[in-house]
Amino acid sequence: MKKHWFGVAVLCFVVCSGLALECAWDESVNESQSLDPVALNALRLGDAVPGTPETCRSACCNRSDCDLVLVTFPQNQNPECVLVSCWFQNRDQCVLQPSNGNGSQDKVYRKKVDPGRRSAPDGAGETHVAPMLLVPSNAETRETNQTNQTNDSLCRQPVKVGACRAAFPRFFYNTTEQRCRSFIYGGCEGNGNNFDSQEACEETCSGVTGPVLDDPAPSGHPAKALRRAPVSASELCLAEPITGPCRAAIPRWFYNSKTGNCEQFVYGGCGGNKNNYLSQESCVATCTVSALPSAKEPSPGDKELCKADPEAGHCRAAFPRWFFNHRTGNCETFIYGGCGGNENNFNSRESCFATCTGSFDSQGEDRRRRRAAFFLFIALAAVAALLLVALITVSLRRRRLSRRSSVVSDKQELLPEDTHSSLESLSAPDGPKPDVA
């Protein structure tokens, strides 16, 4: 009997230990943190429902696709919990941020990651920029949908910015050009042809051909953006780096909009802003993406490309870019909205000159025309100056000759009068005639 109870106790211990391991919570996560609204592709598993932290965690334990519990405390209402799936394409998409200090009582609980179930690749801890989407509870997760899709149909889907107005750099596969191009994702209502990096796009879609598929009709439960303000491009790339009030010394990267480069700075460990990246690669991927020019050798079409006027596009981001001004023969800056536009759009001044000055024989046709016009103007100005000098010289000579002739004529006119006056003054006056006797 004792052996029987001992066996039952051992079995219960093993089962309970297994259940505890299955739903072990990460103690290193500070529950006063919050889920960053820019968490990439983190999926809400249904609407918020009433519940305490204990019941919420219990509900999460009952779902294998639940990785994080977000407990909110609405004013004058009961607590509500949201279950979140953090994993997409084998990457951890949940980004936690410190509490903003506004008195919020929200709590967050994170399951421990089971290495045997999921493995995060290098860079999975980086902060990626995109909205967290709300998916109805009766809808399948995006991960399952995309797993069931073939690469062919996924890569042939049309590029889709979506109805939201955020500005998230992404890549899509262009079946016409058979290469991956960058675009700006609005934040919601996208499709599967939407990749975090050019490498992921090429790995999935390289070699796919065929016409672009029709955009499927929207389902009865369209995805909605989480009701939090999206991060703007000015916060991500145009803000000045902020060390923050803490005293750590963590090397980070920020985008310098004045130089157009990603540069290092020292981060204190808390506070700061969104222009703060773990690596130079993530900084470059976020702030220097555009409708990138082809990496192929310059073609004869580059000449017309470099004559095009800059186009900001129809999106509302604000990325500093370079374009070739064929009127001045120089590469100049402009603000790119993030989508649309034309190919006269470069990430750096160097790439602009490398593409366009070669197309214009180093100096450009327009510059040669201006140079010829300049020399013609100088020549005409010199001729005009010589004519003016000659005219002034002739005028002075005529004036001198005129003065000389007038002096001679004056002397000729005055001489007889003087002589006549002298003779008259020397002649004796007429005396009285003598009387004749």
Image (spheres, grey):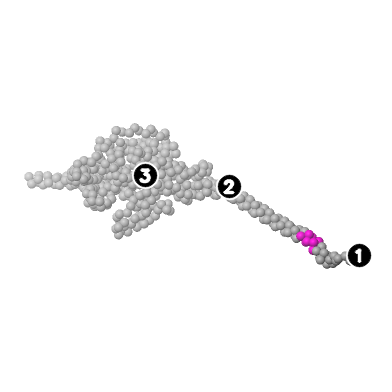
Q: Which residue is mark 2?
A: 369
Residue farthest toward the left in the current orientation of the protein: 1
Left or right of 368: which side holds 408? right
Quadrant of the image containing the C terminus: bottom right
Q: Decide: few, some or many residues near mark 2? Use Cα within 10 Å; few <14, some 14-19, many ≥20.
A: few
Residue farthest toward the front in the current orientation of the protein: 437
Residue at (40%, 53%) from the top-left corner? 256
Front in this rendered view, residue 367 or 414: 414
Q: Where does residue 99 sit, x and y in percent of width and height?
A: 26, 51
Residue at (12%, 46%) from the top-left corner? 9
Front in this rendered view, residue 195 or 276: 276
Whole-number angstrom distance, CA of label 2 to CA of label 1: 111 Å
Q: Where does residue 294 sit, x and y in percent of width and height?
A: 46, 44
Instruction: Give the main secondary structure, helix, strand or loop, of the magenta stretch.
Output: helix
Q: Decide: few, some or many residues near mark 1? Use Cα within 10 Å; few <14, some 14-19, many ≥20.
A: few
CB atoms at circles 3 and 2 under 8 Å apart?
A: no
Q: Quadrant of residue 85?
A: top left
Q: Which residues are magenta?
A: 410-419
Q: Is residue 234 visible?
A: yes
Give whichever of discs 1 and 3 has the lower sequence position.
3
Q: Which mark, residue 436?
A: 1
Give whichever of discs 3 and 2 has the lower sequence position.
3
Q: Of circles 2 and 1, which is in front?
A: 1
Q: Secondary structure at mark 3?
A: loop
Q: Which mark, residue 234?
A: none
Q: Amino acid at mark 2?
A: Arg
Residue at (31%, 50%) from the top-left corner? 125
Q: Amino acid at mark 3?
A: Ala
Q: Which mark, residue 167?
A: 3
Q: Where does residue 217 sit, x and y in percent of width and height?
A: 34, 32
